[in-house]
């Protein structure tokens, strides 16, 4: 048994097994399944084992701005590698190409019982450099609107950014004066010009029930306007993307960060650039590929990779020393 333990091959295999287990423990992101009354279709942004925006609409057009992400660091409720909706430079695992300074809207319309006016919401999100990332709930009497902003359960800016760490909201709830037969869940993001990373969302939950509490008074707040119906475009009207005021209830959530940081972008990091002061509003434009980013700073994953390289180098040195000792022992 002693001779077997001294074999370099055995030590090498054991070392790689330990490293593999450590890597799995560090990067695995396990999320709790969402409640069964979720009204959102495709809340984890996937189709089968692959990332997908099925059920969601990019207000700028199909495969224009929003893309998808799939990596171990994304939260997942099961054994499927984590997936998410992604707003960042590049096309990620498929979809559009994000651009700094552009308002990006991803939304879904769901049906509900209008007799119920108690709304519930939760989601996982992560931000890098972000001017604003928000979720707004709209109510309407038809699937085409018009829409009334009734609740903003999540509203993030650079001062409250998660700094590339996946974060989960609590189960948030609000009672509105009256329910609607249709709701629109709108995910919004805008990251600064000169940067490459914005926001990712996954595990989106929205539901209504009859457990109404005290009605929260709606206060005027900025709520992102949506594109008009196709008929208005045919009539020559141009869609407006400037924020308009609506009676949305401001978010009052407490954020619960997870323990593992992750990058927003797939294969790129934050560019070194001076972020200009954001304007209050900015009309969206069809994105074009920005100029190549400056040299990127090291990320948390880069630091982890460096640690692993050092560990591997030490283990290889250990194997060499043991191998030499074993060879000398055989000669003697």
Image (tube, rainbow, N blue to C red):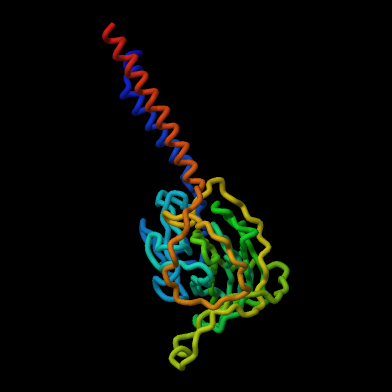
Can I make out residue 201 in this image?
Answer: no
The residue sitting at the left extreme is 331
Quarter of the image holding residue 149?
Answer: bottom right
The quarter of the rendered structure image containing the C terminus is top left
The quarter of the rendered structure image containing the N terminus is top left
Left or right for 221, reference 141: right
Q: Residue at x 36, y 56 (%)?
A: 49
Q: Nearer the viewer, residue 135 or 94?
A: 94
Q: Taking 53 as reference, is 242 above or below it?
A: below
Q: Taking 175 as reference, is 159 above or below it?
A: above
Q: Report x, y in % for residue 144.
A: 50, 82
The residue sitting at the top extreme is 332
Q: Report x, y in % for residue 208.
A: 58, 68
Q: Which of 52 and 179 is in front in this view?
A: 52
Q: Report x, y in % for residue 286.
A: 45, 76
Q: Residue at x 50, y 73 (%)?
A: 110
Q: Nearer the viewer, residue 197 or 74?
A: 197
Can I make out residue 63 in this image?
Answer: yes
Quarter of the image holding residue 309?
Answer: top left
The mark tally for this picture is 0
Q: Nearer the viewer, residue 262 or 25?
A: 262
Q: Taking 304 as reference, is 173 above or below it?
A: below
């Amino acid at each position: 048994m002693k001779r077997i333990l001294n074999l370099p091959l055995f030590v090498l295999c054991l070392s790689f097994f330990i490293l593999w287990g450590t890597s799995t423990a560090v990067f695995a992101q396990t999320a709790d399944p969402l409640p069964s009354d979720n009204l959102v279709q495709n809340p984890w942004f996937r189709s089968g084992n692959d990332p997908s925006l099925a059920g969601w609409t990019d207000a700028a057009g199909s495969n224009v701005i929003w893309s998808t992400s799939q990596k171990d660091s994304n939260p997942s409720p099961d054994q499927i590698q984590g997936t998410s909706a992604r707003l960042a430079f590049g096309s990620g695992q498929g979809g559009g190409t994000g651009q700094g300074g552009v308002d990006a809207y991803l939304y879904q319309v769901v049906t509900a019982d209008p007799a119920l006016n108690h709304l519930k919401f939760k989601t996982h999100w992560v931000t890098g450099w972000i001017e604003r990332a928000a979720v707004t709930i709209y109510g309407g009497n038809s699937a085409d609107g018009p829409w009334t902003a009734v609740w903003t359960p999540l509203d993030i800016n650079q001062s409250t950014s998660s700094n590339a760490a996946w974060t989960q909201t609590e189960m948030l709830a609000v009672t509105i004066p009256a329910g609607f037969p249709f709701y629109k869940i709108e995910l919004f993001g805008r990251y600064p010009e000169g940067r490459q990373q914005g926001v990712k969302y996954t595990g989106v939950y929205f539901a209504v029930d009859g457990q109404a509490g005290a009605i929260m008074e709606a206060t005027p707040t900025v709520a992102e306007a949506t594109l008009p119906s196709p008929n208005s475009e045919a009539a020559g009207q141009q869609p407006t993307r400037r924020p308009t005021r609506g009676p949305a209830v401001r978010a009052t959530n407490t954020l619960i960060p997870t323990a593992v940081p992750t990058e927003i972008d797939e294969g790129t990091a934050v560019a070194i650039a001076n972020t200009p002061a954001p304007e209050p509003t900015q009309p969206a434009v069809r994105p074009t590929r920005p100029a190549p980013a400056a040299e990127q700073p090291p990320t948390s994953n880069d630091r982890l990779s460096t640690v692993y390289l050092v560990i591997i180098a030490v283990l290889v040195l250990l194997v060499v020393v043991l191998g030499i000792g074993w060879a000398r022992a055989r000669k003697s």
